Image: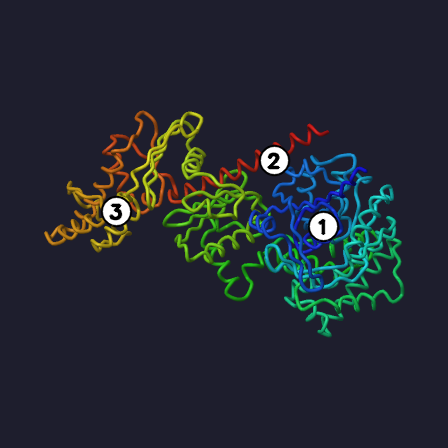
C-alpha cells in the first residue's frame, strides 16, 4: 500500500502567529517549511527549532528553512500561510507567484479587513483562503514565542466558497493539533473578520499612542470609556455593511479584551519601534467603510491619524529612556542631509553596507539611486558588540532597508546582513560608482595597504597588498605619533610646514619607536618628525605596483585624517592622485552599492521566473 504523503505547508513570516502555526501544523503531521528573511532568526530556527511557552508549551524542529520565498519552489506546498504584517504582504505575494501550482492554496493570516485582497491579486479568488486567529503571543527570542492567550475557536474559510474542502482540510489539521479551528462560509468569515478587527481597533492603537499595556488600558476608567465608543462606531459601520452582531456584542468585546495581558499588542509594539503599522486595515478600514455609508467615525479617525502622524514623526527617536536617546543621537549624528524628514527616510527603499574594519566599523545607507542617506562609524572592539547592535537597531527602525552587505575583516563572523563581499570588491564598487573605467585605487587601512587595479568595465583585474606586517598602516601611524607626542589631528598640518627629507629606517613598530625617541633627543622639531613619518609611509606604498596612464584614487581612514600623504604620493608616483570624498566610508559605501545591485538582480530574476511560469 502506497504511503500517503503528508500535507505540505509553507509558513511565510515568523512572528508569534507564524511560529505558533508552524509548530502546531508540524504536530498535526504536516511537513512544514518556514520562510524568514532575517538571517539571524532563520539560522537560529534551523539549528534549534521553534519553542512555544506559557499557554502552549511545545516545540518543533524544521528541516526546511528558507530566507527567500523563491527558494521554496521545489518544496511543492499545498498551502502557503502568509503570517506577515500587511505592510510586507504585497511584496511577498509577488515573490510567491513563482510557487503557484494547481494544488496550491494561499491563506491570509493577517489582522484587519480586506487583507485577503492582497493574496487575491496574486493567486485569484478561487485559490485564496482567509483565517481569523483567536490566539496571540510575544516573541521573546529569535526562536521562542510566549503564547499569551488562546480563545477558541479560530475560523478559516474560502473567500468565495469555491474551495470549502481546502478550508475544511486546514481547519481539521489545526484542530487535530489542539488549535480548535472551524471552517465557515464566506459570509460568516466576513462577520468573524469584522468582529476581530473591531476588537483590535479598540485597543491596539490606543495602547500605542498612550504607551499603556492592554491590561492597563482596560483597567483605567477613562480609557475604557474610549474603548467602548470605538467599538460602538465599528458596530454601526458593520451594521451598514449588513453584518449584524448580537445585542450583547459590546459586552462580549469588553469581556474578551479584559483577558488581554500586561503587555503591548502587536500594533503598539510596531509603533513604539517605528515600524510601519497595520492601522490602514484596522481603524482605517472602519473609517473607509464609514465614509461609504456617510457614518461619522470620529474616534476611529482620530486614532488612525494619530498613529500615522506619530509614525511619520519617527516616534522611536522620542521614546523616553536611554535606548530611545541613544537611537536619536545615532541617527542625528549620521544623517547625511539634515533637511530630510524622518518620515521620508522610513518610506524610501534603502540599502545598507557595513565595513567591519580592523580599527573601525563603518555603516552607510543609500537609496535606490545610490544617494547616501546615512553614515556612521564606531571603534571595532570585540568586547563592544552592544554598541554595534545599537547602531543596527537604530538603522533598522529608521530606514526601510531592503538588502544589506557586510565586508571587511569581520564580515565572516557577522550574520546580520543578506550577503558578504570582500573589501577589494566593495572598494572597487564604491569608487566605480563615481569614476567608471580603468583606475588604480590606493586604500590605506588600519592594518594593511592595498592597491587595486580595475579594468574598463570596473571589474577588479588585480590587487596588491603589503606584507603581513602592519608597517605604514593606520595602526602604525597611531602608535608612532603617540610616541612622538604628536596629535593625530595636527600631524598633517605640521608635516606641511617642513622640508625635511629623512625617513624612518625601520618599519618595525618597536624599532621605529626607538628611532623616534632618538629624533626627539637630537632636538628634531615636531614638523620634521611628522614629515619623516609620512615619507616612510609614502616610500612603503611606492614600492607597490601602480599602473601608469590611468586615474588613481585614494580611499581609507588614513588618508581621511592624513591628507599630506596625498602630496607625497603624488610626488613619488609623479602623477595626480585624487582623494575620494568621505574616503573612510568608501568601502562601506561600495558594500551598500553591492547590496543594491544584488537586490535588483534578485528582483529581476524573480520577475523572469514569474514570466516563465505564466
Q: Position of residue 135 (x, y in %)?
A: 74, 59
Residue identifier under label 3 = 492
Quadrant for residue 538, please give it. top left
**Contact, CB < 8 Å: mark 3 with mark 1?**
no
Establish if 3 lies above or below 316.
above
Expressed as whole percent of the image width and height from the top left, the position of residue 35 reads 65, 45
Which label was assigned to residue 603? 2
Badge nearest the viewer, 3 or 2:
2
Q: Nearer the viewer, mark 3 or mark 1?
A: 1
Real-space Cα distance between discs 3 and 1? 65 Å
Question: Mark 2 or 1, which is nearer the eye?
Answer: 1
Q: In the image, what residue occupies the spot 73% across and 46% down? A: 81
| Apparent side of residue 158 relative to residue 589 in the rendered image (left or right) | right
Q: Nearer the viewer, residue 467 or 252?
A: 467
Q: Determine which residue is flagged by label 1.
A: 26
Badge 3 marks a residue whose secondary structure is helix
Residue 240 found in image quarter: bottom right
Along the line of sight, the residue nearer the viewer: 386 or 567: 386
Amino acid at each position: 500500500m502506497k504511503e500517503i504523503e503528508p500535507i505540505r505547508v509553507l509558513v511565510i513570516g515568523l512572528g508569534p502567529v507564524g511560529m505558533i502555526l508552524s509548530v502546531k501544523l508540524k504536530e498535526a503531521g504536516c511537513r512544514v517549511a518556514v520562510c524568514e528573511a532575517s538571517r539571524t532568526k532563520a539560522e537560529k530556527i534551523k539549528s534549534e527549532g521553534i519553542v512555544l511557552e506559557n499557554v502552549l508549551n511545545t516545540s518543533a524542529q524544521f528541516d526546511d528553512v528558507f530566507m527567500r520565498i523563491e527558494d521554496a519552489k521545489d518544496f511543492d506546498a499545498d498551502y502557503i500561510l502568509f503570517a506577515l504584517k500587511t505592510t510586507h504582504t504585497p511584496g511577498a505575494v509577488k515573490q510567491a507567484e513563482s510557487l503557484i501550482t494547481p494544488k496550491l492554496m494561499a491563506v491570509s493570516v493577517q489582522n484587519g479587513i480586506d487583507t485577503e485582497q492582497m493574496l487575491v491579486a496574486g493567486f485569484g479568488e478561487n485559490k485564496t483562503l482567509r483565517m481569523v486567529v483567536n490566539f496571540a503571543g510575544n516573541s521573546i527570542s529569535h526562536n521562542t514565542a510566549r503564547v499569551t492567550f488562546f480563545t477558541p475557536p479560530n475560523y478559516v474559510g474560502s473567500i468565495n466558497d469555491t474551495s470549502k474542502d481546502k478550508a475544511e482540510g486546514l481547519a481539521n489539521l489545526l484542530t487535530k493539533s489542539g488549535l480548535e479551528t472551524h471552517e465557515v462560509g464566506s459570509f460568516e468569515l466576513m462577520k468573524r473578520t469584522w468582529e476581530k478587527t473591531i476588537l483590535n481597533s479598540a485597543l491596539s492603537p490606543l495602547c500605542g499612542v498612550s504607551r499603556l499595556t492592554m491590561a492597563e488600558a482596560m483597567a483605567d476608567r477613562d480609557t475604557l470609556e474610549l474603548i467602548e465608543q470605538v467599538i460602538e462606531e465599528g458596530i454601526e459601520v458593520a451594521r451598514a455593511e449588513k453584518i449584524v452582531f448580537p445585542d450583547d456584542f459590546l459586552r462580549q468585546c469588553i469581556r474578551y479584551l479584559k483577558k488581554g495581558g500586561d503587555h503591548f499588542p502587536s500594533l503598539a509594539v510596531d509603533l513604539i519601534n517605528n515600524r510601519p503599522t497595520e492601522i490602514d486595515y484596522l481603524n482605517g478600514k472602519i473609517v473607509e467603510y464609514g465614509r461609504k455609508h456617510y457614518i461619522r467615525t470620529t474616534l476611529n479617525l482620530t486614532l488612525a491619524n494619530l498613529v500615522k502622524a506619530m509614525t511619520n514623526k519617527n516616534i522611536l527617536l522620542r521614546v523616553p529612556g536611554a535606548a530611545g536617546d541613544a537611537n536619536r543621537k545615532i541617527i542625528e549624528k549620521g544623517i547625511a542631509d539634515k533637511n530630510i524628514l524622518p518620515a521620508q527616510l522610513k518610506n524610501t527603499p534603502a540599502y545598507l553596507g557595513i565595513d567591519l574594519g580592523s580599527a573601525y566599523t563603518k555603516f552607510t545607507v543609500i537609496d535606490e539611486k545610490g544617494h547616501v542617506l546615512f553614515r556612521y562609524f564606531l571603534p571595532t572592539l570585540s568586547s563592544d558588540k552592544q554598541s554595534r547592535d545599537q547602531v543596527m537597531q537604530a538603522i533598522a527602525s529608521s530606514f526601510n532597508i531592503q538588502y544589506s552587505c557586510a565586508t571587511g575583516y569581520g564580515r565572516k563572523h557577522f550574520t546580520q546582513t543578506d550577503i558578504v563581499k570582500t573589501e577589494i570588491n566593495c572598494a572597487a564598487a564604491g569608487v566605480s560608482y563615481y569614476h567608471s573605467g580603468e583606475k588604480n585605487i590606493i586604500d590605506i587601512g588600519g592594518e594593511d595597504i592595498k592597491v587595486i587595479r580595475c579594468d574598463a568595465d570596473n571589474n577588479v583585474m588585480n590587487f596588491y597588498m603589503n606584507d603581513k606586517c602592519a608597517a605604514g598602516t593606520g595602526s602604525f601611524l597611531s602608535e608612532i605619533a603617540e610616541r612622538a607626542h604628536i596629535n593625530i589631528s595636527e600631524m598633517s598640518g605640521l608635516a606641511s610646514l617642513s622640508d625635511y627629507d629623512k625617513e624612518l629606517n625601520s618599519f618595525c613598530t618597536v624599532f621605529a619607536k626607538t628611532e623616534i625617541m632618538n629624533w626627539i633627543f637630537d632636538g628634531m622639531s615636531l614638523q620634521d618628525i611628522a614629515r619623516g613619518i609620512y615619507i616612510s609611509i609614502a616610500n612603503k606604498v611606492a614600492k607597490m605596483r601602480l599602473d601608469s596612464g590611468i586615474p588613481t584614487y585614494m580611499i581609507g581612514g588614513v588618508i581621511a585624517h592624513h591628507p599630506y600623504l596625498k602630496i607625497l604620493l603624488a610626488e613619488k608616483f609623479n602623477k595626480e592622485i585624487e582623494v575620494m570624498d568621505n574616503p573612510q566610508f568608501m568601502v562601506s559605501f561600495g558594500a551598500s552599492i553591492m547590496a543594491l545591485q544584488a537586490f535588483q538582480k534578485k528582483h529581476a530574476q524573480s520577475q523572469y521566473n514569474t514570466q516563465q511560469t505564466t
